Image (cartoon, grey):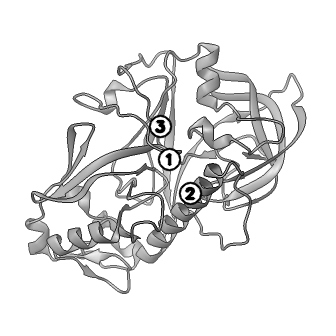
Amino acid sequence: MFSSTSLLTVVTLVLGFASGTVIVVDRSPILSLPLKRINNFTSGHDILAHDLARINKFNNRAKAHGSDKPAKRQAEPVINEVVSYIASVGVGANDKQSTDTGELVEVSYGSGDFVGLEFIDRVTLTPSLVIQQQSIGIAIESDGFEGVDGILGIGPVALTEGTVDGSVTVPTVTDNLFALGSITENLVSISFEPTTTEEITNGELFFGGTDSSKFTGNITFVPKVGDFWGISQSVSYGGTTIIDNLSGIVDTGTTLLLMTTASFDAYIAATGGVLNENVGLFSITAAQFAALKPLEFNIGGTTFSLTANAQIFPRSLNVDIGGTANDIFLIAGDLGPPGTTPFDFVNGYVN
């Protein structure tokens, strides 16, 4: 989705997975987009409220998709994005006019929604990644996209079902790049680095493969579960299983690690976390932090560990969420009882 008056800037929301052999692509020609992170929070309450509101929108979308009805805009409060990821994208060309398909488009995202008209136009991600005939939603009315010109959707194409009149689904930019032969694999990967500042360029979208400079070891691929970028996983802390082979999603637009109430309570009890009413997150003491054990995720038979530092909110940003420099806040949040959402967990960006 893009506004009718602008050509640049998108918010990137969803992490991509694909199954198959890892493709490591040479960085020339350029196949990647740098991502800038911008924090827009004033308290931990903001972060948790945003995350839960976002998941609620996903819940509504999943229900609509399951009933073969498109998700429609609803009268509900708009929760401002607390963390945005910005990339520059070119839309349109000087040598030709956009093609108006005459079709209406209506989409609800985790961060907002819009209604408008569907056009066909050129989209330029990099000089090497250009789509001449990309379907684009031009917004007549939108909510939740303040400060940016649009969204670059890279979710599963099935989620576009019913969003454009006269179309079954709408190919994403990744689908079109693969169809054009611009990328060798229908895959988009995302990398982020931990941040200690409010605004920093510390991420990357990489189309058609993986950027070998951003990781060590091997990448584990698993089948997609459900409508979104879903996976199955088990999670343990200190040798105790708190999530036992359940299904959820990986979502870069969610900040915290969200678990259903029973799993969350088990983790908080094991770590000794205490709710900080002012901030809205659970805190631990310095002694408890020193004793913090790895939080281990078993995904597709591979174990990934969150170290002690990876389980806490960046302390350099404590004051920004209403805490003090010496506070230590856990990055976990309560997703609610099972059945509240279609997900048993949400693996957010974390920090």
| Residue matched to label 2 | 58
Q: Alpha-carbon neighbours of circle 2 within 10 Å: few (<14), some, or many (≥20)?
A: many
- Residue 128 seen in this snapshot: no
| Residue matched to label 1 | 36
User: Residue 348 appears in which quarter of the rendering?
Assistant: bottom left
In the displayed structure image, the side of residue 302 where residue 208 appears, left or right: right
Image quadrant holding the N terminus, namely top right
Work out whether 260 lies above or below 151: below
Q: Nearer the viewer, residue 89 or 346?
A: 346
**Is the C-beta separation of discs 1 and 2 under 8 Å?**
no
Work out whether 307 lies above or below 316: above
Q: Which residue lies at the image location 36% right of the left edge and 69% below the top edge?
A: 333
- CA gap, disc 3 to disc 2? 16 Å
The disc labelled 3 sits on which kind of residue?
A: Gly
| Residue matched to label 3 | 16
In the displayed structure image, the side of residue 86 where residue 77 appears, left or right: right
The disc labelled 2 sits on which kind of residue?
A: Phe
Q: Which residue lies at the image location 32% right of the left edge and 27% below the top edge?
A: 213
Q: Nearer the viewer, residue 180 or 260?
A: 260
**Is the C-beta separation of discs 3 and 2 under 8 Å?**
no
Q: Nearer the viewer, mark 1 or mark 3?
A: 3
User: Residue 193 appears in which quarter of the rendering?
Assistant: top left
Q: Nearer the viewer, mark 3 or mark 2?
A: 2
The disc labelled 1 sits on which kind of residue?
A: Lys
- Residue found farthest to the bottom: 277
Q: Alpha-carbon neighbours of circle 1 within 10 Å: few (<14), some, or many (≥20)?
A: some
